[in-house]
Amino acid sequence: MPREEHVAAAELHEAAAKSHRKAAEHDEKGDREAANQHSAQAFDHAVKAYAASKHAHEKSSHHTTHAT
């Protein structure tokens, strides 16, 4: 199951990146409200991505440690 854990983490990282890009687009257009909303979304996704990455890493480490 570690592969699924890593894929889930990657999807959250991609969601964070997408929100960051949207925030940048809105910021360039001067739409601060939308930029702030997307920035907050990016932060939320990034926090979740960090937790998912940590969890995936721990599962992978545990899996490889016990596989030998």
Image (tube, rainbow, N blue to C red):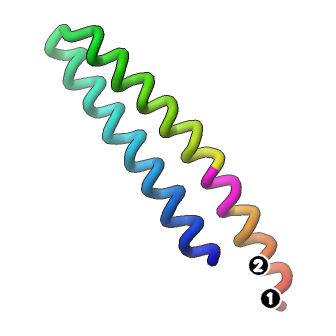
Q: Nearer the viewer, residue 57 or 48?
A: 48
Residue 54: say if magenta.
Answer: yes
Residue drawn at (42%, 30%) of the image: 41
Residue 3 picture quarter:
bottom right
* Residue ID for mark 2: 63
Which amino acid type corresponds to the residue marked 1 in the rendered image?
Ala
- Which numbered disc covers residue 67? 1
Residue 56: give x, y in percent of width and height: 65, 62
Residue 31, percent from left and from top: 20, 11
Picture quadrant of residue 27:
top left
Q: Is residue 3 magenta?
A: no
**Residue at coordinates 27% horizontally, 9% vertically from top-left?**
32
In 3D space, how far apart are the residues under numbered discs 1 and 2 (Cα atoms)? 6 Å
Vertical relation: 53 (above or below) 5? above
Q: Is residue 44 left or right of residue 22?
A: right
| Predominant SS of the magenta segment | helix
Left or right position of 53 against 12: right
10 Å neighbourhood of mark 1: few (<14), some, or many (≥20)? few
- In what quadrant of the picture does the C terminus appear? bottom right
Region rendered in magenta: 52-56
Q: Position of residue 50 (x, y in %)?
A: 61, 45
Dot 1 falls on a residue whose secondary structure is helix
Residue type at tag 2: His
